[in-house]
Amino acid sequence: MGKKGVEILTLDVKSLIDVLNQALSEEWLAYYQYWVGARVMKGPMHDDIEKELLVHADEELDHARLLIERIIQLGGTPVLSPEEWFKLAHCKYLPPLDPNIEAVLKQNLGSERCAIQRYEDIANFTNGKDYTTFNIVTHILAEELDHEEDIESWLEDIRIFREEICKA
């Protein structure tokens, strides 16, 4: 980003870079949480949900790419060490210790809700002050909202499936 580009930002760029690095750390952890959870989970609708969770993982990885590019444009350095991810992330990585599909989905749902709050906060921080970052984070926010909706839908489908089996 050129000097004029940074100059027109009406916010604390260092604070923004810090927040973007926190979000970046969370995206790396979310990527792995989705990826490994999809691989180890067991239960009804496993095959279909696994495919979709791997799509979610790829989208989280793309979010990380977008954040890295923006951090660099702002003159910052993206978090360079995986050890730092755990220190910087407010949305924590939850290992899928219980491979039950509902447990994995509930973990991911909690993580998505944390991410939604993260990107809403960044959008509010940048709105009217940094249009490029605002556009990036609202794009990410829209995808996180879609992820939440997908997970809620799968959990509802599993609940209905369970009720139907119990009736039989």
Image: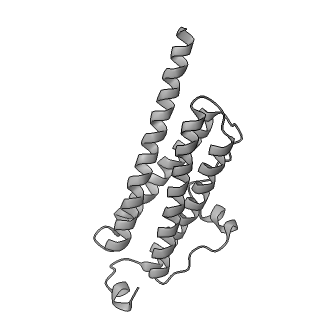
Residue name at image x 45 percent, y 44 percent: 148
**Among the 4 quarters of the image, the one containing residue 5:** bottom left
State the residue lying farthest toward the left.
Answer: 128
Residue name at image x 48 percent, y 28 percent: 157
State the residue lying farthest toward the top.
Answer: 168
Q: Is residue 106 visible?
A: no
Across and down, in percent, residue 74 comes to 44, 81
**Which of the image's four quarters has the N terminus?**
bottom left
Residue name at image x 50 percent, y 63 percent: 62
Is residue 68 shown above or below 165?
below
**Among the 4 quarters of the image, the one containing residue 96:** top right
Residue name at image x 52 percent, y 21 percent: 161
Across and down, in percent, residue 134 comes to 35, 67
Is residue 109 shown above or below 61?
above
State the residue lying farthest toward the bottom.
Answer: 3
Across and down, in percent, residue 58 comes to 53, 56
**Among the 4 quarters of the image, the one containing residue 89:** bottom right
